[in-house]
Amino acid sequence: MSLKSEKGFIGVDISIALMIFLILMAGITGMIYNINKENNSIKRKSQALNFAISAVETAKGIDVSSLEISGLESELNSCYTNSNAVVTNTSLNDSFLSLKKDSVSYNVELSIVDYNEIDGNIEAGTAKQVTVNVTYSIGGKREAIELKGIVI
């Protein structure tokens, strides 16, 4: 009686191992891609929120009687320049500012409304509502953050 020695791998064993390996690698690659995509989304949303917060805080540092869009121009330019952002549109006459940070473009739109127009019980000129809309692109979609603050 002769018995065959079963040493080593045969073609079927190797092909099954390769298929399992490829299936696992596809799953791992997909997970890594999704994690990186979410990480970039969170970074961009965080940066947009930082721009919006700095705009509202800058507005709060200005006296309410002189708070106007044109008055914010120099304050915001220096604030955004200090945050290492590249300001590509320095004119706020149209209440619109274009910024670029880490090769991502952000559009900041400002509006200032006398709070008397919102709540008629408040005396005109004593409080103003500042609204900041920051839009940016992520994954081919436009995302937006809106932040409102009241300056007294």
Image: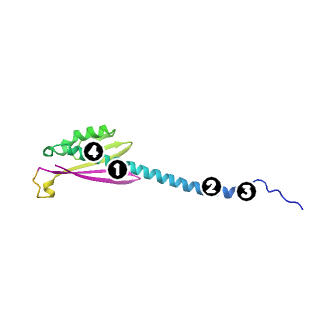
Work out whether mark 4 precedes mark 2 in sequence or the reverse, and give the earlier one: 2
* Residue 116 % position (x, y): 13, 55
What residue do we see at 27% from left, 45% from top? Answer: 54
Q: Is residue 137 magenta?
A: yes
Q: Earlier in the sequence, mark 3 or mark 1?
A: 3
Q: Classify mark 4: helix, strand or loop.
A: helix
Look at the numbered disc 1 and give the secondary structure of its residue: strand
Q: Is residue 58 left or right of residue 31?
A: left
3D distance between C-alphas at marks 1 and 2 = 39 Å
Is 131 part of what is drawn in magenta?
yes
* Residue 21 badge: 2
Q: Which residue is mark 1?
A: 136
Q: Are marks 4 and 2 in contact (CB under 8 Å)?
A: no
Structural distance between the alpha carbons of marks 4 and 1:
17 Å
Q: Earlier in the sequence, mark 1 or mark 2?
A: 2
Gap in Å between the C-alphas at discs 4 and 2?
49 Å
Q: Amino acid at mark 3?
A: Gly
For label 4, the residue is 54
C-alpha gap between disc 2 and disc 3? 15 Å
Q: Marks 2 and 3: CB-CB under 8 Å?
A: no
Q: Quadrant of residue 13?
A: bottom right
Q: Of circles 4 and 1, which is in front?
A: 4
Q: Which three-letter amino acid code belongs to the residue tagged 2? A: Phe
In depth, the one of 135 and 124 nearer the eye is: 124
Is the stretch drawn in magenta largely helix, strand or loop? strand
Q: Magenta segment, which residues? A: 125-152
Q: CA distance from mark 4 to mark 3?
A: 64 Å
